[in-house]
Amino acid sequence: MMEKLSDETRATLLDPLLATGWALTDGRDAIHKTFEFNDFVDAFAWMTRAAIWAEKWDHHPEWFNVYKRVEVTLTTHDVGGLSTLDVKLARKLDSLAG
């Protein structure tokens, strides 16, 4: 069973993500980041690659795409906030964009 990040592990797991452009979301226990690509095709290709991992891990991002920009929010609805699965998916999204 997935658990919400504890106070003890939050900084250790989230600080590296915050250093790469992720940010805490106001008003909820979530993180978000905006990814920008060269054009719509690159953005959509990245979303497709990301969707494969999200489905494989059964953890689906909240996202919004306009042209070459994709806004992503991660939280684990089952635990009511951030979990290690959000950290794992955030790292994967960053690696797919890199």
Image (cartoon, grey):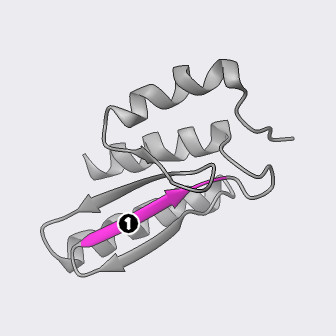
Residue at horizontal 65 percent and vertical 52 percent from the top: 57
Q: Is residue 9 above or below residue 66?
A: above
Q: Is residue 79 magenta?
A: no
Q: Where residue 85 appears, x then y in whole percent?
A: 64, 43
Q: Where residue 86 appears, x then y in whole percent?
A: 59, 45
SS at mark 1? strand
Q: Is residue 71 magenta?
A: yes
Span highlighted in magenta in the image? 69-75
Query: Taking 49 as reference, is 20 left or right?
Result: left
**Residue extending farthest front:** 27
Which residue corresponds to mark 1? 71
Residue at horizontal 12 percent and vertical 67 percent from the top: 38
Query: Taking 67 as reference, is 94 left or right?
Result: right
**Residue extending farthest left:** 38
Nearer to the camera, 27 or 31: 27
Q: Where residue 19 appears, x then y in whole percent?
A: 32, 31
- Snapshot quadrant of residue 70: bottom left
Q: In this view, does 6 lie above or below 85?
A: above
Disc 1 residue type (three-letter)? Glu
Q: Quadrant of the N terminus?
A: top right
